[in-house]
Amino acid sequence: MEGQPMNLDNLSKYQDKKQFLDVIRAKTIETKIKCHGCAQVIIQTFLDILEEDNLQVSMAASPFTAGLALTGHNCGAAIGALMVLGLVYGRRDMNEGMPGILKGMWPMRKFVRYFERQYAHLNCRDLTGADLAVAHQAADYFEVGGLEKCAARMADAAAFVAELIYDEGARP
């Protein structure tokens, strides 16, 4: 059974790549500040901008905030970015096995390398310097602009993914 990849037809609504990236950045920051939930924010940003309706994927991303379920492990922004890339490049048929996985892996690996170069870490706790599941640490982090720092990091991650997707969607 073949799944449906994310529809890139709506990329044509944007004048150029810069406009698309600017919209992705702004929407990511706006949604993060308002709603929280790193992975879900990135997923929902792309779903909204590309005019996709996929409540199940958005809901599946909700545990990836402040790391894996508030543990401080794996950054939710990185997970959300990889989920978006999976919606575009991921294996569409489980029966394809490992070759099906590997076929679409290049943009995902490119993103992980980018994120590690930019931020030196993939774990939320390392990126924030706080355990966001501990109330006083979370309050201290947010008091010194942590939410805005995370939103900016998320916007960068989303823009990198958007650039990969735009380049793919803009191909004839």
Image (cartoon, rainbow, N blue to C red):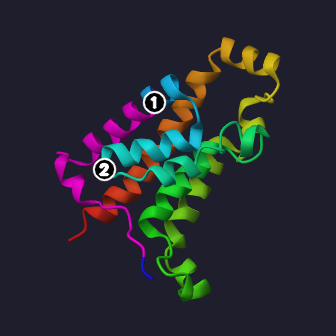
The magenta span reads: 3-29
Q: In the image, what residue occupies the spot 49% across and 81% down? A: 93
**Does residue 108 show up magenta in the picture?**
no
Q: Crowding at label 2, few (<14), some or many (≥20) Cα neighbours within 10 Å?
A: some
Q: Main secondary structure of the magenta part?
A: helix
- The answer to whether 61 appears left or right of 9 in the picture is right
Instruction: Say what secondary structure mark 2 lies in.
Output: loop
Q: Depth check: 25 or 101 in front?
A: 101
CB-based contact (under 8 Å), mark 1 and mark 2: no
The alpha-carbon separation of the residues under discs 1 and 2 comes to 15 Å
- The answer to whether 12 appears left or right of 18 in the picture is left
The picture places residue 146, in percent across and down from the top left corner, at 64, 22
Instruction: Say what secondary structure mark 1 lies in.
Output: helix
Q: Which mark is residue 31?
A: 1
User: Can residue 123 be seen here?
Assistant: no
Q: In the image, what residue occupies the spot 41% across and 53% down? A: 54
The picture places residue 86, in percent across and down from the top left corner, at 50, 64
User: Can residue 6 be seen here?
Assistant: yes
- Where does label 2 land, which residue? 50
Q: In the image, what residue occupies the spot 49% across and 74% down? A: 104
